[in-house]
Image (tube, helix red, strand yellow):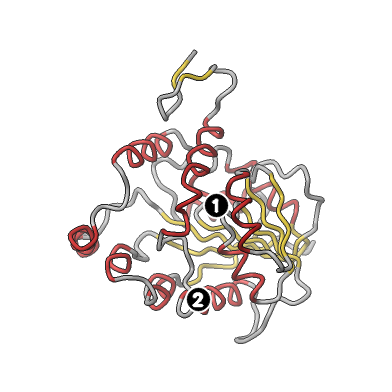
Amino acid sequence: MTLNIAGAAQPASNFSLKDEICDYWSGRAATFDQSASHRIEDRHGLPEWQRLVRSACALRPGGDLTGWQVLDIACGTGEISRVLTSLGASVTGLDFSETMLGLAREKLAGRDWRPVLSDAEAMIQIDDSRFDFAITRHLAWTLTNPQSAYSEWFRVLKPGGRLLVVDGNFRAPRSLYQRFRNWLADRLAGAQAKQGDRVRHEAILNALPYGEGLDAGRLALDLQAAGFDIDGQLPVRPLYGRGMRGHGLADRLRQSAEGRFALVAVKPEA
């Protein structure tokens, strides 16, 4: 027997780091939409995310995704899927947490959306060259086998298909300005996470391939190794500035574009 990161006894052969990650996020699912870093507020946040998706898909301002087959990788409770369906896309939401998918089903009932319970690193249920566009938010840093994942994402996109990865270097030192903002937010609303959650989160991060941090440069190199061409980065500051105006002051103070990025990659036509 061995101890998993959470401290529970598990057979060493039956409980992997991937299981630990799934268990961690499933345990947070019920309160996930309470987090300002996850929930996309309708009045200010939704338009900013729609603009980002349009830019990633090389659409004109005001354009939509009608007729597009889109994959939301690690869809969680369906917030990004909600953005995509609001633009007219036909969306497949993929996640390895049944708990997350259950919440997404309720949220997206009646929309052009279907769930797939699957590991983002081994999409065995999905055919080759199926999607016009794929998007993932805050997943890449948690991958246990990044190159396997990127090869799968490449495989399921159509030639010419586009990929948007929104992520961040969550190990990058915070500026003095952001540390002050976080301190002020804690004074206003109290610390967000329990100490136990922070310890578990750090333990998981330390065990990951990107445990020392993931930036856009390293991600670009790893995506190129999987066959992608890099189309460039998109600005994320509007998501964490104008897009946060519907949240409370403490949440707005905590949110920052520091260390975050949005990288667009393309599967070559040939």
Q: Quadrant of residue 149?
A: top right
Mark 2: few/some/many CA within 10 Å (<14, 14-19, 20+): few
Q: Which residue was labeled with disc 1?
A: 221
Residue 193 coordinates in the image, percent (x, y):
32, 48
Decide if residue 260 is on the left or right side of residue 163: left
How far from the left and from the top, in percent, is residue 190? 23, 55
- Position in image of residue 69 (x %, y %): 76, 66
The type of residue carrying mark 1 is Leu
Residue at 47% in and 16% down: 2
Is 163 placed above or below 2 here? Answer: below
- Give the amino acid at mark 2: Asp
Which residue is rendered at x = 37% and y = 59% of the image?
259
**Quadrant showing the C terminus:** bottom right
The CA distance from mark 2 to mark 1 is 35 Å
Image check: 249 left or right of 204? left
Give the residue at x 35% y 48%.
171
Q: Earlier in the sequence, mark 2 or mark 1?
A: 2
Residues at marks 2 and 1 touching, judged by CB atoms closer than 8 Å? no
**SS state under label 2:** loop
Q: Residue at x 71, y 68 (%)?
A: 110
Judge whether 96 appears above or below 262 on screen: above
Q: In the depicted view, which residue is nearer to us: 163 or 225?
A: 163
Specify the quadrant of the image occupied by residue 3: top left
Say if 47 sits above or below 176 in the image: below
Which percent across, then down, holds residue 128? 81, 52
Q: Label 1's element?
A: helix
Q: Nearer the viewer, mark 2 or mark 1?
A: 2
Q: Quadrant of residue 19?
A: top right
**Which mark identifies residue 42?**
2
